[in-house]
Amino acid sequence: MGNCIVPYCDGPKNTNIRFTLPAVCFVWQSAMIILFGVFVRYNEEADTHWVEFKAKHNITSDIENDFYYRYPSFQDVHVMIFVGFGFLMTFLKRYGFGAVGFNFLIAAFGLQWALLMQGWFHSLDPADGLIKIGMENLINADFCVAGCLIAYGAVLGKVSPVQLMVLTLFGITLFAVEEYIILNLLHAKDAGGSMVIHTFGAYYGLSISWVLYRPNLKDSNHLNGSVYHSDLFAMIGTLFLWMFWPSFNSAICDHGDGQQRAAINTYLSLAATVLTTVAISSLFQKHGKLDMVHIQNSTLAGGVAVGTAAEFMLMPYGSLIVGFCCGLISTLGYIYLSPYLEKKLKIQDTCGIHNLHGMPGVIGGIVGAITAAAASVPVYGEEGLINTFDFTGSFKNRSPAVQGGYQAAAMCVAICFGIGGGIFVGLILRMPIWGSVTDDNCFDDSVYWEVPDKEEPAPPVLEYNNHMASHMNV
Amino acid sequence: MGNCIVPYCDGPKNTNIRFTLPAVCFVWQSAMIILFGVFVRYNEEADTHWVEFKAKHNITSDIENDFYYRYPSFQDVHVMIFVGFGFLMTFLKRYGFGAVGFNFLIAAFGLQWALLMQGWFHSLDPADGLIKIGMENLINADFCVAGCLIAYGAVLGKVSPVQLMVLTLFGITLFAVEEYIILNLLHAKDAGGSMVIHTFGAYYGLSISWVLYRPNLKDSNHLNGSVYHSDLFAMIGTLFLWMFWPSFNSAICDHGDGQQRAAINTYLSLAATVLTTVAISSLFQKHGKLDMVHIQNSTLAGGVAVGTAAEFMLMPYGSLIVGFCCGLISTLGYIYLSPYLEKKLKIQDTCGIHNLHGMPGVIGGIVGAITAAAASVPVYGEEGLINTFDFTGSFKNRSPAVQGGYQAAAMCVAICFGIGGGIFVGLILRMPIWGSVTDDNCFDDSVYWEVPDKEEPAPPVLEYNNHMASHMNV
Amino acid sequence: MGNCIVPYCDGPKNTNIRFTLPAVCFVWQSAMIILFGVFVRYNEEADTHWVEFKAKHNITSDIENDFYYRYPSFQDVHVMIFVGFGFLMTFLKRYGFGAVGFNFLIAAFGLQWALLMQGWFHSLDPADGLIKIGMENLINADFCVAGCLIAYGAVLGKVSPVQLMVLTLFGITLFAVEEYIILNLLHAKDAGGSMVIHTFGAYYGLSISWVLYRPNLKDSNHLNGSVYHSDLFAMIGTLFLWMFWPSFNSAICDHGDGQQRAAINTYLSLAATVLTTVAISSLFQKHGKLDMVHIQNSTLAGGVAVGTAAEFMLMPYGSLIVGFCCGLISTLGYIYLSPYLEKKLKIQDTCGIHNLHGMPGVIGGIVGAITAAAASVPVYGEEGLINTFDFTGSFKNRSPAVQGGYQAAAMCVAICFGIGGGIFVGLILRMPIWGSVTDDNCFDDSVYWEVPDKEEPAPPVLEYNNHMASHMNV
């Protein structure tokens, strides 16, 4: 993609976003208010009519409101989205504001748009044509946003906030359609979103990065690296993602055993990933020294890969095996595959999302398909099998083997939406109207942020110099 | 307030708190132990007699203990108080220890005193005259502390820890009285404390800052600014406040739909605030660059403003509108109003709490009054209306319109307590016995903290100099 | 221990862990997979057979699954283990990677091994000889890991990651045995693990540090101190530990009042500790300045000391008294005892775990014994007494006084296991095969980590030098 296929893309760059960014924010937020006013209401568990709903459905206690099943997980997911993704990307020495700040901006916009888009597909009340939202919608909106934040990782430091807003608008839309196809039409299961979120998000971001390829970037990439404290900030992101991933994968699982099993599986898979990540990182570095990039990212791969099968009877050892493999593959990806992708395929992947979300997401989809196909009554129980795979209604007669096939089909849908959507959106982002940054100013906060002056230079050195200068004058 | 009205306030400053700080801590903590020993016991849900209580009230399961309805929110609120407020104030380049450390100190003291003060008003057991505490008391104590931490924001860097302890002692006391008047006598609703917490806290702090006005401060304010990493630390505070605000506003709402609705409203309002904050920040800065001060603070204004009405049927679009307006007003406040307040009204507001808590708090009170007055049976349902506004007992015949009037009256009470209390406490803090800091040493941790040496100056530079020096000697 | 008693320990140090670390990680993780495959399954609440279990036990709602009682606390404990312990140890100026990273590594390994070891003792299903795990096992595994992380604090910066893996392997094993003796054989209660976790962990770590004594360390300890920002990173750890300690102490308490009471007691104890810590820190420092070391550590002592008695009817004032004493003792420990331990007893305790976990843990055990011995029916109620102390089965006739005796015995077991186990493991760690660091390189991340280059020296200084140099050449 070194040759520019869009004629208008090589003009002089103008990073002044004083008009476009406010315009986009105001117009889109106003649109949200209007659309929410026309379409969105509380569902019956969040509405004051809950008291009548309770009576009607013989619910004996307020604690059976879905809110209490999901709220702790919801808050954990929220932390992952804003602190987890945000701080994970602060590893660059001078792009911390952009990492945390733009992550914040696009997540806050994205979740509103996601509530609408997902609501139209999943929460439309046929009685009055309104979208009825509750706790589960909020979690799903955070999930939807996660897809776009993953994509942001590939283009971190190389795009303007306006481009990110566009990336998010289209990303959420594509996500909602893809999710509808996978969950409703194919009736695939994907509790933790290995396919729907991670695979889609990763290939969406990588495709955009491919279209936006910057051939001269490496000449000016002295800012494309970390400093000591920025690596510690990034570890805040890593740890909050790692710790709360069991909540991510269990947040929208079935009440009762489903949520618990998903949490256990994720917990175990992540634990195993840490050890193989450390092993590979040490083994492939001279003197066996560990690389912070691997610890920050590859340790999370197990959570991605166990997402689809989280609610299944994967068994504790199954989760460990998934985690074991992912730590290995993800770390090797950082060492061998990322440089290859950049050199040969012209894909510049700032955060290495292909290693953290792409490959583990695909592995997750495959694990999910195999585990689903292997499900059986002896392991799940009669009712357990039906509950876990939701073999009800028009899917009453689907067998586990067939379900496995649909799971595999779902994976293909996620990849296609990611790549196709990414190329489409990438071409839009090449228009010169979005305030994109020049190669020289990539990875530099000072383009879009008022950056405080550096700390004063250490006084003793200066004094010493002055002292010398006075000597010289003599 | 340039002229000193308290005769003893202009003597030489003595920042040595080696006697006063330990004395205050020991005496007050001992007093707490004695008062708790005489007055405070567990309530029936935290006591071992819960098993009998359960039987008596036909409670079928332990999960219906109030603990399980509120504990997740409680912990989120706790994070907001200690990490949220603490780190939000670390933006100054050399006042991180004071921000996090003194926030920690006064919160830990304040919550004990709050348990007593609020307990006397709300949790007194008439049977034995003892205060009976449980989960809800702990949340309320954190709320009460929040009022004082907001006030700390106005005087950050300009007061001693002993002054902060005094500020907290009186602040908690005033808060408890004000809260009793608003919630019990006026029977106003204020789930998220727009009035009780934010409006009171903001005007309390601003009034203190007014009384403690330092006319010569700007000459020495090279420390009154941020450095790159201090801005990132502050973002930790911002994000934890932002993410957990739904828990803050829903923590003491009614079981069931009340808590869920409050969480949804807050989530939406905050999302909208982010976009308008970014828009205004970019629009009013040269080259459209974003200002970290706005992102750190104004993005939170929507959570403040939706506090009073959080539990009402504000509707999702209503929440978005509130958030939209608050991001706008709060950011404009930082740009235009704060400099004006400092120059004309002699109010030095280090963190800009007037923009983050003051104005949004007042907006929240107004929104609450309007929404309450507009409440109707068609929207809330018969029972829903009674439950939401607690139209029971002696308030059985109150109409929504009348409730709106009382809500407005409550707002006035909060402002009066804030301003009146703040001036009173400010005068007390002017006494020269509290170890206050001189103008020269404001915003400098080294006055009250053992600060580690700077990192060694970069060796290469030194070596180079030495090399030059040896040349010169030749 | 200045003289080396193990003949092979004084050979030249080789810090290259490129073979040993990967080998240990791969072999142990593979062993975990095999052992989990053979021994570990989901328990009936995490299994798809939950639906049948529910029917059999007349459980009416999914919300009564143990998962919903414990998951919020579990996540808080998880945060304490990974962010709390990890960041608390980042206070050293150049050991942040090792603090957070190795903490991450050994916790991730430790919890797998703990699930097995504790499972064998506590969760073995006699029907099929398999370990059945659920939410409570995950919490207990985190608890078990906490013991080893405490021990890490004593040897922070002085050991290799391989040594830490060995320390963890043996630590978990010893912990599981000790816990079995204390909880099952002696039938002592220890909800928050003052004895089982903190006392054991502290003396285990101190004994190891004693065996690994480095007499020449002080000559090269310019890295054994903090810088400004590293102290702020450490405060992240402190605050998350402090805030979530109520969850730690209540996580495995009885459903209902037990969990709530434990949370309240811990909350109060910790609040009191902050004030006495600040008081002592200021009182014993010249000019009354506060020391970050005390604020970071001693403020947590109250949570440790209230652990054993957390679930008892300690009363709110009792909790405050415990916290009051611990803040005092712990801070005095940092000022007087730690230097003494290092000089006279040759115990180098990097993080001062003796002051944070050792002494407070012992105090906690004593408080637990006294409170248990003083328990009575008037205070607890007939059923409450039986529930709280689990006076059922073969312990039906145990009196509170006798229980107090067993609590004291349990404390002795914890200390003996800690000291004995620590000396044993310390001797193993002296073997020269673990890649240990030399005295010169202690507290330095660059031994085991790829550390990014320092930030570029401030350009103005360099330019000025160049300018001078050119003048000189003329």
Image (cartoon, coloured by chain):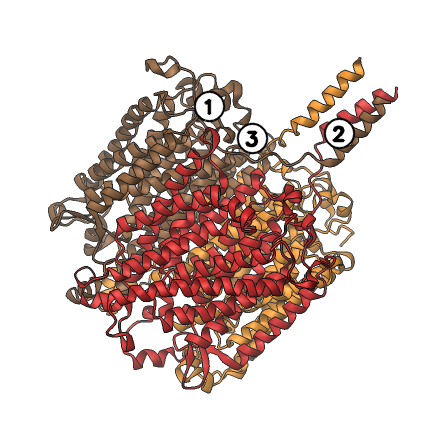
Chain colours: A red, B orange, C brown
Compute the Cα span from label 2 to label 1: 37 Å
Closer to the camera in the image, A78 or C405? A78
Q: Is residue B65 above or below residue C254?
A: below
Q: Say which mark, if any, is on residue C339.
A: 1
Callout 2 touching callout 1 (CB < 8 Å)? no
Dot 2 surroundings within 10 Å: few (below 14), some, or many (20 or more)?
some
Question: Tag 1, which secondary structure?
Answer: helix
Where residue A152 sits, quadrant-wise, is bottom right
Chain label for disc 1 = C
Question: Tag 3, which secondary structure?
Answer: loop
Compute the Cα span from label 3 to label 2: 32 Å
Q: Say which mark, if any, is on residue A462.
A: 2
Amino acid carrying mark 1 in the image: Pro
Callout 3 touching callout 1 (CB < 8 Å)? no
| Residue linked to disc 3 | C285
Q: Position of residue B344 (x, y in %)?
A: 78, 59
Q: Position of residue A235 (x, y in %)?
A: 49, 44
Q: Is residue C432 above or below residue A231?
A: above
Q: Position of residue A127 (x, y in %)?
A: 41, 86
Chain label for disc 2 = A
Closer to the camera in the image, C339 or A286? A286
Amino acid carrying mark 3 in the image: Gln
Mark closest to the chain's N terminus, 3 or 1: 3
Dot 3 surroundings within 10 Å: few (below 14), some, or many (20 or more)?
some
Closer to the camera in the image, B384 or A122? A122
Question: Which of labels 3 and 2 is toward the front?
Answer: 2
Report if residue B197 is visible in the image: no
Question: Which of labels 3 and 1 is toward the front?
Answer: 1
